[in-house]
Image (tube, rainbow, N blue to C red):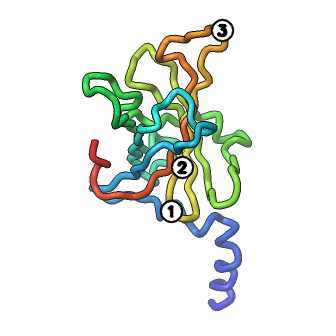
């Protein structure tokens, strides 16, 4: 028995912390909340006041099902304007499961990264890619990317390039929006 415990201690870090994914499970009244990184090199097409909420169900992650949703809120935006994301489902991209991108490693402190497609609230807008990294400090990073149209100097709002890096932490409630 002692040998089996020692074996698990040695192998668990190789198997990503013996189900460390479970540490990111949310309670009924919890969300991952945070704001965009302010650096201009990690932000394009988004206001420096944008906040994000992630609802996340870890039990669905490895099943290839929709594991949650993303919402954004721009604290400086007029109330009547449409949000970029409003409970937008994280859509798994099935072929990635058998591709090297499913093993994407974004460096130290990021234990595991997932790639999803996300549809904006605006129905005519182009979809975005969400790269969700689970960090060793129990925070989550979300990189929201849309390449935009290369053939236009002034693309329409829903076709403009977007890049945003958000750092989210577990909080009670719905992040206030």
Q: Residue furthest right?
A: 100
Q: Quadrant of residue 69?
A: top left
Rendering coords of residue 159 (x, y %): 53, 16
| Contact check, label 3 and label 1, Cβ < 8 Å | no
- Residue denoted by label 1: 138
- Residue denoted by label 2: 141
Secondary element under disc 1, as helix, strand or loop, is: loop
> Do we see residue 10 in this rendering?
yes
Quick one: label 1, few (<14), some, or many (20+) residues within 10 Å? Answer: some
* Distance from the alpha carbon under mark 3 to that under mark 1: 40 Å
Quick one: label 3, few (<14), some, or many (20+) residues within 10 Å? Answer: few
Secondary element under disc 2, as helix, strand or loop, is: strand
The label shown at residue 91 is none
Rendering coords of residue 9 (x, y %): 65, 80
| Contact check, label 1 and label 2, Cβ < 8 Å | no
Residue at screen point 59% across, 35% down: 94
Quadrant placement of the C terminus: top left
Residue at screen point 38% across, 37% down: 71
| Contact check, label 2 and label 3, Cβ < 8 Å | no
Q: Quadrant of residue 5?
A: bottom right
Q: Is residue 72 above or below residue 17?
A: above
Residue at screen point 63% across, 57% down: 110
> Do we see residue 28 in this rendering?
no
Secondary element under disc 3, as helix, strand or loop, is: loop
Q: Is 167 on the left or on the right of 52, as rendered?
A: right
- Residue denoted by label 3: 151
């Amino acid at each position: 028995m002692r040998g089996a415990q020692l074996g698990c201690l040695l192998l668990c870090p190789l198997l990503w912390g013996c189900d460390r994914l479970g540490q990111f499970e949310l309670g009924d009244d919890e969300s991952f909340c945070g704001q965009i990184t302010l650096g201009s090199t990690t932000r394009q097409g988004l206001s420096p006041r944008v906040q994000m909420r992630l609802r996340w169900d870890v039990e669905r992650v490895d099943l290839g099902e929709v594991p949650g949703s993303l919402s954004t809120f721009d604290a400086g935006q007029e109330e009547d304007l449409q949000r970029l994301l409003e409970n937008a489902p994280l859509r798994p991209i099935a072929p990635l499961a058998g591709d090297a991108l499913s093993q994407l490693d974004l460096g130290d402190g990021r234990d595991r990264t997932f790639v999803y497609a996300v549809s904006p609230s605006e129905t005519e807008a182009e979809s975005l890619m969400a790269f969700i990294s689970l960090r060793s400090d129990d925070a989550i990073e979300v990189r929201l990317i849309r390449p935009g149209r290369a053939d236009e100097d002034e693309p329409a709002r829903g076709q403009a390039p977007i890049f945003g890096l958000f750092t989210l932490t577990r909080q009670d409630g719905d992040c206030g929006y």
